[in-house]
Amino acid sequence: MYFCTIPFVYKVFLIPGNKNRKAKDLIMREPLLHSEKPLAELLRPKALGEVVGQSHLLDEKGTIRKLLNLHRLPSLILWGPPGSGKTTLARLIAKEMEREFVQLSAVFAGVADLRKVFDQAQSALGTIVFIDEIHRFNKSQQDALLGPVESGLIILIGATTENPSFSLNAALLSRARVLVLNRLSTTDLEALLQRAETFLDQRLVLTPAAREALIDLVDGDARMLLNYVETIAALNGEEDLNAEQLGLILQRRAALYDKNQEYHYNLISAFIKSMRGSDPDAALYWMARMLEGGEDPLYLARRLIRFASEDVGLADPQALSHSLSACQCYERLGSPEGELAIANAVVYLATAPKSNAVYMALKKVQKAAS
């Protein structure tokens, strides 16, 4: 007996043989050829009203809704994490505007491909050109977009997971409006789970705790969630899986982190803000996220030294010594033992009193002296 990874479409026929078997055991399920699309593609919204999440852009006061009501769409840069709906929004915007839609990937396309699109757009002014991973375009490729965008030959919608301020030319950014997409919330992901169950006509065999663990695991990524749903639905088990069993089946998702790009800056910012907010639990969490993603522990140790000097200051003069000691301890011990010294320093700084009075005073006198 075998199952399709998308179990809502079947050829159903009886298996010859033992007549004493239960009827449900005599059913063999075989996927139809046209059901091989991933569940994430099959559940892709057909209208803006079906989109889960991004209400700050799509509700009546949202930016996209306002632009569509005005029937004057500027070029857009959609900046958001994986699985937040950038491609879906681009397609639905083109559908709503009733414009020609051309999709390119910056991974594979070059200037020659852009020129072909521009030539085709001559017969359909205002063609919407969607470029996925637009941050992968080099300077000359981005510059090739400037003229057609400025003249109105095309309306550019670029999608990126990286901060456009760092990854896109200033000239291109000046001709487009940047819209930020958020990770899907727990509520959004639960709604998406329910939609998937309705579509598949089956309840996922998960305990409430495992269901929560699944939502936590995908970290706001709708595509990843639906990919996992396919795996769980294909099991067609009779007993609910607990969180531990779910983890064994799905294995562990790689930490979403890069050491020198957008996630790096987001996580170090969250790390510092947690210590400023005197939240040692959150600070330890962000520290662990960065270390798990491959961050250099000495980088974190250096940031602690700066934090002790800048944010704690003379409110606790021992903070600086504690941070320096943690850095030296790691240099002597390395990983993983030395990471405990850094963790101690993180908790010390997060719970220490804070004062940036000296830091602010120094900035003022430096300005006066310059």
Image: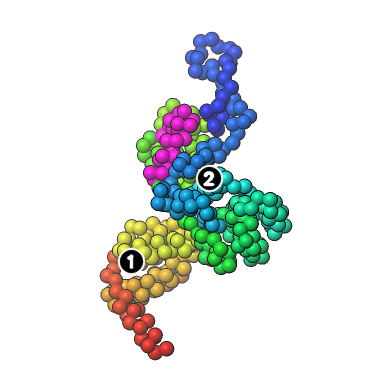
Q: Indicate which disc, 2 or 1, sits on the residue closer to the N terminus.
A: 2
Secondary structure that dominates the magenta span: helix
Highlighted magenta segment, given as a residue range: 186-206
Q: Residue 237 in the image: x percent, y percent? A: 46, 28
**Which residue is farthest top?**
19
- Name which residue type carries label 2: Glu
| Residue drawn at 40 percent across, 48 percent down | 60
| Residue drawn at 40 percent across, 51 percent down | 61
**The quadrant where residue 346 appears:** bottom left
Q: Is residue 287 above or below residue 368?
A: above
Front-most of residues 69 and 213: 69
The residue carrying mark 2 is 96
**The quadrant where residue 173 appears:** bottom right
The residue carrying mark 1 is 276
- Residue 63 in view in this figure: yes
Q: Residue 337 in the image: x percent, y percent? A: 43, 62
| Residue drawn at 62 percent across, 61 percent down | 151
Label 1: state its secondary structure. Answer: helix
Q: Residue 38 in the image: x percent, y percent? A: 56, 38
- Name which residue type carries label 1: Arg
Label 2: state its secondary structure. Answer: helix
| Residue drawn at 54 percent across, 16 percent down | 26
Q: Residue 236 in the image: x percent, y percent? A: 48, 28
The crowding category of the residue bearing disc 1, from other C-alpha atoms within 10 Å (few below 14, some 14 to 19, many at least 20), is: many
